[in-house]
Amino acid sequence: MATNGTSLIDANGLAKPVTKLIDAISKAIGTVYTPTHLKRMAHAQAECSLIETRALIAKEQLKERASERIINTEIKRQRNIDSISEKAFSELPDSVSDIPPDEDWMQEFFNLSQDVSDESLQLLWARILAGEVASPGKFSIRTMQLLKTLNSREATLFFDYCSGVFGFSGRNEKVYARIIGLKSNEILFGKMSHMEIIHLAEIGLVSYKEMSAVLKESVYQEFDRIEYFHRKFAIKDLFSIFSPTTWIYSMFYNGIIRLEFLTELGAELMIVAKGNYSEEQLDAARFDLDVAGCRLIDE
């Protein structure tokens, strides 16, 4: 019980009138009296302290989870980098340039490829790495940025498409294109639809703008060489001034072939996508060129 006017509570910080009233009440009721608003303040402070403690605990748990996520992500990335690097060894050619690959290019290569875990896509990245190390400047960063956006379905579509792509050379230029013809189309559309080809165009691999090329020697021959994987051919006009039968033939066959070109980025990626060599595809090209009045001569 309070006696002799001594305060029974710690009233630090309270105004003298307030402490006097509290002392008076405490003496009267025989126990320390704490005003309701002080109780509420004390309770609020306790709640605040509890909230702060919980917040600190939650923050530490968040840091721990973030740390674990970062560690797991970096471990996965390192595995991807190691896998791509190992695959690159088997893709190296027999001879390589003495010029070292650009350091910035190498840095960007691993930045772009580190999240690729699909085996088929890793192989494409490995071929790019091997090709660039063998011959620096072969692949642009833009090509790698495009490859990073491809999923396995798109890579498979492009692989199938490249199985029917030929390299056309002439007048100091070389382009990669698919022959648009009866037999060639029959093979292609047995593998994919028009919409899938349009999709390849939308992602920047195929131009999907057919162009006509003149292959007639007697008029204006844009391309006089063609290659398909390891096979190389000369493109010859069927017309011959020494063969009268070909004069009539040339009246019906104008030596013009329609082509569907790869974009510049598509041509770079074709080096690694490759596709499958097919005698059926080569025979189809022969047929479609023959319809245009041309023939292939082995070199």
Image (cartoon, grey):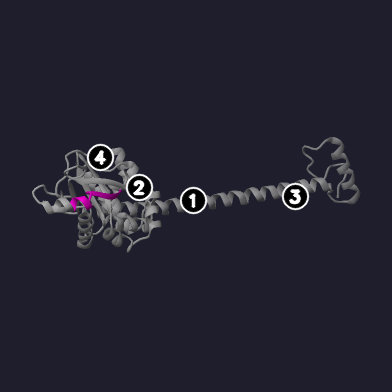
Instruction: Report which residue position mark 1 lands on.
Output: 66
- Where is residue 257? Give x, y as percent: 25, 50
Give the mark nearer the N terminus: 1 vs 4. 1
Mark 1–mark 4 distance (CA, rounded to whole Å): 39 Å
Left or right placement of residue 196 versus residue 48 in this view? left
| SS of the residue under disc 2 | loop
Give the residues in magenta: 249-261
Name the amino acid type tagged 3: His
Left or right placement of residue 32 versus residue 189 in this view? right
Give the mark nearer the N terminus: 4 vs 2. 4
Mark 4–mark 3 distance (CA, rounded to whole Å): 71 Å
Query: Viewer-proximal residue, 45 or 102?
Result: 102
Instruction: Report which residue position mark 3 lands on.
Output: 43
Name the amino acid type tagged 1: Ala
Instruction: Report which residue position mark 4 lands on.
Output: 137
- Where is residue 7? Give x, y as percent: 83, 42
Mark 2–mark 3 distance (CA, rounded to whole Å): 76 Å
Give the mark nearer the N terminus: 1 vs 2. 1
Give the mark nearer the N terminus: 4 vs 3. 3
Label 1 or label 4, whichever lies nearer to me, is 4
Where residue 209 is drawn, which disc sits there?
Answer: 2
Query: Viewer-proximal residue, 230 or 25?
Result: 230
Name the amino acid type tagged 4: Gly
Give the quarter of the image for residue 8: top right
| SS of the residue under disc 1 | helix
